[in-house]
Image: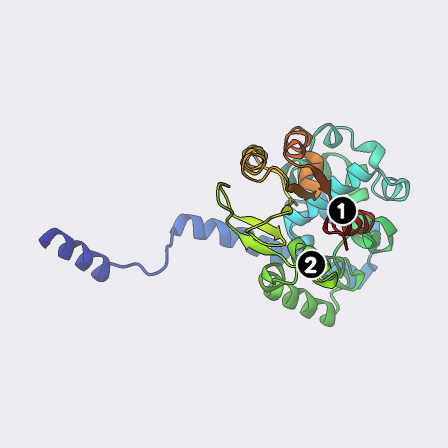
Amino acid sequence: MRIRNKGIEIVLNFNTFYFRDEIFEDEWEKYVSSLVQKLLMLKNDIQTEGLSIKLLTKYLQSENGLDAVLALMGISQESFVRLITFLKIVNDPEANALINKKYWKILYKETEVRFDRLKKEIKNNEKVAKGIASLLIRGSDLPVIRNVLPLFEFKKFDISKLNFEVTSLIDTIIRYKTKGQYSASAQNNPESVIKKLLEKNGIKFATGKLKGVRRNLDFIIPNKDEPMIIIESSYEITTGSGMGDKAKIEIEVSKDIKKNYPNAYFIGFVDGIGWYVRKSDLKRVVLAFDEVFTFHKIQLQRFEKFIKEVMKL
């Protein structure tokens, strides 16, 4: 009791409230200040010379130039390299020409493009730097980008941001502030698409645990007592070692379902650039399911037809 009380007293009397590493804080402030100064220089040069691919290329090749420009536009490093990886995968001729893809030999040897590698190539290869500058200035004109990016992200590729227009800078601030709410919204997730489709067709469903199955399930149709269709959704926008674990778990869940509910279909919605890039894990995860769908319009139509046939609607 005495030791516990002493411990409580120590925590209350010597609480730092916020973690603070002064060396780290100083280094980070230097980094932030360098971005501010770089953007002020860019703003001055744009006002003097006008925005151009040549000017932006020069800035991108300077120290932390890409960091500064992405901050100005409100684009995260993760989102940007994901877009680069996407452009690499889709191999769109118009996009290839815009980003000078034929000069990206080193980057395109990698499964995914890393931000540090991208910065290095921009610094050392003017053709790559010019391609990125062109993407930042003209990317919103590309149909392949316009058709795939969510509107919330697409609006960040607004050339007025690079011209430091006040309205566009306010837009960057607002999008940064609301990003968490946007991402966390219950309406902004793949499962909501499945839910709406089921509700549109008057199909009852439950969620959660099924007896004899080791994990919670996304959709159990029509109920837990007599499941006919069991659906799991996995939309991966990034890659990681956890995807291999996810594939393993789904295979084990599949075994549970086949053992306890042999007449039920186990359906997987497997989608996103993460699975596309991580093909070894993709090959494993699809083995768990009786049918696999994505959230593509054609696939959703196929799913709707499938579920109507099974439910005899």
Write down the quadrant of residue 107 in the picture.
Answer: top right
Write down the quadrant of residue 192 in the picture.
Answer: bottom right
State the scheme by which the image is colored.
rainbow
* Depth order, front residue of 264/255: 264
User: Where's the C terminus, which quadrant?
Assistant: bottom right
| Neighbour tally class for label 2: few under 14, some 14-19, many 20 plus, Cα within 10 Å | some
Residue 127 vertical position relative to residue 144 in the rendered view, above or below: above
Q: Which element type, helix, strand or loop, lies under badge 1?
A: helix
* Depth order, front residue of 98/255: 255
Instruction: Identify the residue position indicated by label 2 in the image.
Output: 203
The residue furthest left is 2
Mark 2 is on which residue type? Ile
Residue 58: which disc?
A: 1
Mark 1 is on which residue type? Lys
Residue in the picture at 62% in, 38% down: 239
Whether residue 126 is visible to the viewer of this picture, yes or no, is: no
Residue in the picture at 85% in, 32% down: 102
Whether residue 23 is visible to the viewer of this picture, yes or no, is: yes
* Depth order, front residue of 90/35: 90
Query: Where in the figure is residue 29, as x and y percent of width and height?
Result: 50, 54
Query: Where in the figure is residue 87, as x and y percent of width and height?
Result: 79, 41
Comparing labels 1 and 2, the label whose residue is closer to the camera: 2
Query: Where in the figure is residue 257, as x and y percent of width and height?
Result: 57, 38
Query: Where in the figure is residue 80, as x and y percent of width and height?
Result: 69, 47
Residue in the picture at 65% in, 54% down: 191
Q: Which element type, helix, strand or loop, lies under badge 2?
A: loop
User: Where's the N terminus, which quadrant?
Assistant: bottom left
State the separation of the CA atoms marked 1 and 2.
57 Å
Earlier in the chain: of badge 1 and badge 2, it is 1
